[in-house]
Amino acid sequence: TNAEAAEVAGQRAEESRRRIEAGGLPVAAEERLRQLASAEGGPSLFTSDLSVQEFTLLAGLGVQPLTQVMGSSIYNVGWQPVYFNSPTEVTVLSGAYNESRRLALGRLLEEAQLAAADAVVGVRIVRGAHDWAARAIEFIAVGTAVRLTPDMRHPDGGTVLTDLTGQEFVQLCRAGIRPIGIAAHTSVQYVPASWQTQQATSGGWSGASWVNQELGDFTRGVYAAREKAVGAAARQARELGADGLVGVQISEHARTHSVRRGMIDCEDLEVTFHVMGTAIREDPA
């Protein structure tokens, strides 16, 4: 009956809500992937975002595409100070970015595992923002789940994520190098404008703004954000037992904050560094 169908739909919606809050997948997504994994003889039809060249090269190694997989997380950023009086990491923002990415990659990994995949290739992460949630950030992770030949599978039997393309994946395997996971980190640094920077950017009649000069404090802030992000990604790679990181993608964006210190109006800098790459290990087998 309609009433029974509505009750079942309500129960499924409530179960999906609980799973999302626990960092998992909604019911419908899990059911579809389990059905795909249990199909006798493998799936009759696969979906992927592989190019023709990627698909051909992977097929030449006996790699079987299974399905596109995705992980998403929209994350609300908590309260943070309006500005700081000394250079510092904005841990509220850094933490929000890193947790949102972790949830998105975790859901992508769960989808791949439900599909009985050995790896996900071509993982790409898209960052989003929404007018209806000004304090929210979003990460969407997308890739193609594949089944590897027995000699290419991870020794521990785990599902491997890599942001390498299909061509790059094949090149590594032919060179006796194994992708073993993704390492990624974000660091947000706040840099208050020094007196020299205030004079240089004020546009007043002091003469300082008329001279070519480096804004040293802002430059140091960019380096600090880079070092924290790259350093954290490197630690993740070491924990995976990697020899190094390849295909490292670095994106940076900055914005200024108008603040008033004492009787002076100035522009402080907030700089964000995102780092992501594939951890690799030499493995001739």
Image (cartoon, rainbow, N blue to C red):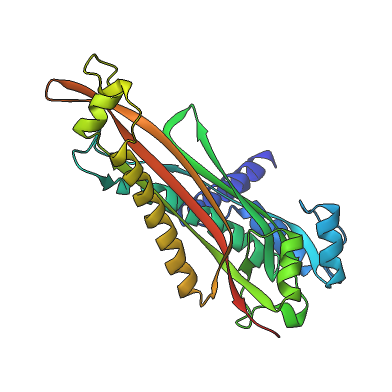
Compared with residue 66, is residue 262 higher up or lower down, i.e. above or below? above
Which residue extends farthest left? 262
Q: Is residue 213 left or right of residue 98?
A: left
Could you say where residue 31 lies in the image, as x and y percent from the top left?
68, 58
Could you say where residue 41 lies in the image, as x and y percent from the top left?
86, 71
Quarter of the figure with the C terminus: bottom right
Quarter location, residue 86? top left
Q: Nearer the viewer, residue 40 or 198?
A: 198
Compared with residue 262, is residue 191 higher up or lower down, i.e. above or below? below
Compared with residue 86, is residue 122 higher up or lower down, i.e. above or below? below
Q: Nearer the viewer, residue 246 or 138?
A: 246
Which residue extends farthest bottom? 285
Q: Determine if residue 183 is in view.
A: yes
Q: Is residue 260 left or right of residue 154?
A: left
Q: Determine if residue 35 is in view.
A: no
Could you say where residue 147 lies in the image, as x and y percent from the top left?
75, 70
Compared with residue 273, is residue 33 higher up or lower down, i.e. above or below? below
Which residue does the image show at 56% across and 60% down from the upper left? Answer: 277
Which residue does the image show at 62% across and 48% down from the upper left? Answer: 8
Q: Is residue 123 left or right of residue 68?
A: left
Q: Nearer the viewer, residue 35 or 64?
A: 64
Quarter of the figure with the N terminus: top right
Report how many numbered discs are placed on residues in the image.
0
Could you say where residue 192 lies in the image, as x and y percent from the top left?
24, 36
